[in-house]
């Protein structure tokens, strides 16, 4: 039974629903999601990689049983790739075909700049959905250029996009927008002010255990505690890439798959590559901190 | 202005007052945020006091620093003890006004005179900023160095933005602009007679920086490091190294923008290596380990060092020659040039000089900003 945004009464029920879908959130995040659902205010999630920012959008689309439209940002992302593009080949063919037909230039132009020739990219898709409001995930916005950020302002505040050839398209079903950022650069104030700002940090031991347990109910408590404790210790070391929660889950899965029931020096050295992703980190930890990881 | 929640008559009034209070203490809260807060309250039946905080927090905050400040403000405002919030005590709230921790002070261990610094900030005017930009980094007091850091951050950001914009206006002919070509071809029955092009964004070139972090250089290196961090979005590839007696690659830290962590690590190393600089050996190390991988596609190479080398000058001369052969331009920034009567006659500097394309100073903020011209040609 999918959840309907307008039936939602309080954050408690929202938290429960999220948990059913294996997403462990705290009340602070739940309130932001609540406001996202009720007021369509975009949520900007910032925090280190691998702590479930993107996951929230996936879970939300499942929760509402609606489409997830994802725009992965990258340097140089432009309007053609994010909003729309004309189907040039089709347009060229059409021009040839209607060449000898009667009709004014204006009419012909209207034909080849019609919906049939428009290729919708994620942002336009998100606002032209007519059945059910989709979840729009704008992932890693900090990777895009500042110019693109400015372009998003119109979309985020009034849910509309202006296309020179077609006019302004306004959303009939306002999408639920989630933006994520790893904070590799500072986003503009204008963008931030249009969003609910949430900083997500690495979870504490109890919460991390709960998250892993949710994902992998079969894991034994002893192993679970050992793994999460070790990861929490790893995060305190000065590493080139600090492991996130997704690494913890990967690690736990790897250890289970190998059939180990507890964490010891051998298991760690076999599977550490699941948690640490650079050779320098691996060498440093294997060389100096193995014992420390195993201590209670 | 109502300064604390208990002095107000209703929850709505409290929230409006709290918005004003937050704004007065440096949070970016406008009418829009206040209205959004009421809209939120309309939807969410509050069950406990914590929920109100969680509702306001994402609306009023825009960064982790804001969130820390918010905690303090929230506690103070909704506290039932009367506190004199007017007058001088206003800025005592931790983090208010000045949000970022000043990395240079942490590095130099001079972080604990908050009062004096605040005072200095209030009295500084435009003229002072002007003269600070021309002050030699090594002659700055700790107060000034903090002020200058703020000015520098702003100016470096502006510069990076300028460099980006200039790129966009390029007139190079690039890819065909299909959209425009087709649109105009309607006039000619679909024959694309007039072709329109997209200006191609020129590739940002590569930059390699080597910072000398030996004792005498640390103030200079710190500002250049900040400079490097601002530039990271601008160059296709930016490689940064620090050296004194050995060489460390910090490119990844730069790519991830971990300025504070880098400075911290740097601080530790500076203390460890109070012995002299071995520029030659470090460059040799660079050529052996990274040379093949990094020194291609003619990058621009910038070295920041005072050239006081304790190693063998022959090694330095040889390695410099190798590097110069592979780069587009080899720039050496030496803060000592600004000193009157300075001549590059020390052993190391003398050995390196023949291979240097551009030998210039980098002793104050203005001289760093003048690098924009070099970077623009990169």
Image: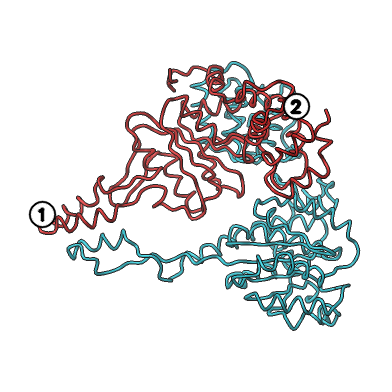
Image quarter for residue A123? top left
Q: CA distance from mark 2 to mark 1?
A: 78 Å
Q: Are marks 2 and 1 on the same chain?
A: yes
Q: Is residue B32 left or right of residue B276?
A: left
Query: Tag 1, which chain?
Result: A
Image quarter for residue B159? bottom right
Q: Secondary structure at mark 2?
A: loop
The image position of residue B263, as x and y in percent, is 77, 53
Closer mark to the observer between disc 2 and disc 1: 2
The image position of residue B354, as x and y in percent, is 74, 83
Query: Tag 2, which chain?
Result: A
The residue singled out by tag 2 in the image is A262
Q: Colour of chain B?
A: cyan
Q: Quadrant of the N terminus of chain B?
A: top right
Residue at 29% x, 63% y is: B181
- Taking B113 as reference, is B139 above or below it? below
- Taking B82 as reference, is B217 above or below it? below
The image position of residue A252, as x and y in percent, is 67, 30
Q: Residues within 10 Å of mark 2 (few under 14, many from 20)?
A: some
The residue singled out by tag 1 in the image is A103
Q: Is residue B179 left or right of residue B49?
A: left
């Amino acid at each position: 039974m999918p959840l309907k945004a307008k039936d939602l009464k309080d954050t408690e029920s929202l938290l429960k629903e999220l948990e059913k879908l294996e997403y462990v959130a705290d009340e602070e995040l739940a309130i932001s999601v609540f406001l996202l659902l009720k007021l369509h205010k975009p949520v900007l999630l910032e925090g280190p990689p691998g702590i479930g920012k993107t996951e929230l959008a996936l879970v939300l689309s499942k929760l509402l049983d609606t489409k997830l439209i994802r725009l992965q940002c990258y340097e140089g992302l432009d309007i053609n790739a994010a909003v729309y593009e004309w189907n040039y080949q089709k347009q060229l063919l059409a021009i040839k075909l209607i060449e000898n037909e009667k009709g004014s230039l204006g009419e012909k132009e209207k034909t080849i700049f019609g919906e049939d020739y428009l290729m919708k990219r994620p942002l336009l898709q998100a606002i032209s959905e007519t059945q059910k409001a989709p979840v729009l995930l704008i992932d890693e916005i900090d990777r895009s250029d500042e110019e693109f950020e400015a372009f998003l302002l119109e979309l985020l505040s009034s849910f509309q996009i202006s296309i020179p050839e077609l006019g302004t398209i306004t959303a009939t079903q306002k999408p639920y927008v989630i933006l994520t950022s790893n904070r590799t650069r500072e986003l503009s104030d204008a963008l931030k002010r249009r969003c609910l700002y949430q900083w997500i940090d690495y979870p504490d031991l109890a919460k991390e255990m709960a998250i892993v347990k949710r994902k992998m109910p079969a894991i034994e408590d002893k192993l679970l505690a050992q793994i999460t404790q070790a990861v929490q210790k790893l995060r305190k070391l000065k590493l080139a890439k600090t492991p996130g929660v997704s690494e913890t889950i990967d690690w736990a899965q790897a250890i289970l798959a190998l059939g180990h029931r507890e964490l010891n020096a051998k298991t760690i050295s076999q599977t550490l590559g699941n948690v640490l992703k650079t050779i320098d980190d691996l060498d440093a930890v294997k060389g100096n901190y193995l014992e420390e990881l195993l201590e209670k | 202005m109502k300064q604390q929640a208990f002095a107000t008559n209703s929850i709505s009034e409290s929230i409006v007052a709290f918005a004003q209070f937050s704004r007065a203490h440096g949070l970016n809260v406008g009418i829009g945020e206040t209205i959004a807060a009421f809209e939120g309250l309309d939807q969410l039946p509050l069950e406990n006091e914590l929920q109100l905080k969680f509702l306001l927090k994402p609306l009023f905050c825009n960064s982790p620093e804001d969130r820390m400040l918010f905690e303090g403000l929230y506690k103070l405002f909704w506290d039932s003890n009367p506190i004199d919030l007017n007058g001088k005590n206003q800025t005592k709230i931790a983090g208010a006004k000045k949000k970022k921790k000043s990395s240079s002070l942490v590095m130099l261990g001079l972080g604990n005179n908050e009062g004096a610094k605040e005072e200095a900030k209030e009295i500084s005017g435009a003229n002072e900023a002007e003269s600070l930009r021309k002050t030699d980094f090594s002659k700055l007091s700790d107060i000034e160095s903090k002020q200058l850091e703020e000015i520098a951050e702003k100016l470096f950001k502006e510069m990076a933005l300028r460099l980006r914009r200039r790129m966009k206006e390029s007139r190079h002919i690039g890819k065909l602009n299909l959209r425009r070509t087709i649109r105009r071809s309607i006039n000619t029955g679909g024959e694309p007679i007039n072709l329109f092009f997209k200006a191609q964004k020129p590739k940002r070139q590569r930059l390699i920086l080597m910072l000398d972090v030996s004792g005498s250089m640390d103030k200079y290196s710190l500002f250049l490091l900040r400079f490097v961090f601002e530039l990271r979005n601008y160059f296709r590839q930016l490689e940064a190294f620090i050296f004194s007696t050995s060489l460390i690659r910090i490119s990844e830290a730069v790519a991830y923008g971990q300025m504070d962590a880098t400075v911290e690590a740097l601080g530790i190393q500076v203390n460890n290596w109070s012995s002299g600089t071995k520029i030659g050996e470090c460059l040799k190390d660079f050529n052996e380990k990274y040379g093949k991988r990094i020194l291609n596609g003619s990058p621009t190479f910038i070295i920041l060092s005072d050239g006081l080398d304790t190693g063998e000058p022959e090694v330095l001369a040889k390695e410099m020659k190798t590097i110069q052969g592979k780069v587009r331009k080899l720039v050496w920034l030496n803060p000592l040039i600004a000193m009157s009567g300075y001549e590059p006659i020390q052993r190391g500097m003398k050995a390196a000089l023949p291979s240097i394309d551009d030998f210039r100073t980098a002793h104050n903020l203005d001289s760093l900003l003048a690098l924009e011209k070099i970077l623009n040609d990169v």
